Amino acid sequence: MCGFDFQRQYPDLGKPFIECHYIVPLSKLRPGQRTTLKDLALVCANCHRALHRMSDPSDLNSLRRSLSDQWDR
């Protein structure tokens, strides 16, 4: 999402950090429905928190556009 590189920023902490965001919220899954890789997005902790504050947490492109607009300034 944002391109933050934990390995470069925190080299002494070892392996990079990543969080898994469910594009389809767990509460929306049907009983017994399986999660697939296309249902998930790997994001940094800040982007993960931002996604959950949005009106539609599944709209990854909206957050990408917002971040891109900030970088272009």
Image (cartoon, rainbow, N blue to C red):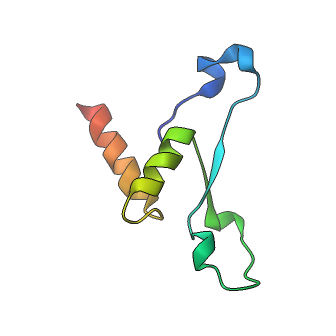
Determine whether 13 is above or below 70 in the image: above
Determine whether 10 is above or below 2 in the image: above
Q: Give x and y (percent) for residue 36.
A: 71, 69
Q: Residue furthest left?
A: 73
Q: Residue furthest top?
A: 12
Residue 72 or residue 4, whichever sits in front: 4
Residue 32 or residue 2, whichever sits in front: 32
Question: Residue at coordinates 66% horizontally, 40% vertically from top-left?
Answer: 18
Q: Give x and y (percent) for residue 46.
A: 50, 39
Residue 65 or residue 27, whichever sits in front: 27
Quadrant of res 22:
bottom right
Question: Residue at coordinates 63% horizontally, 71% vertically from top-left?
Answer: 26
Q: Give x and y (percent) for residue 19.
A: 64, 46
**73 relative position to 29: left or right:** left
**70 relative position to 38: left or right:** left
Residue 13 or residue 42, whichever sits in front: 13
Quarter in which the C terminus is drawn: top left
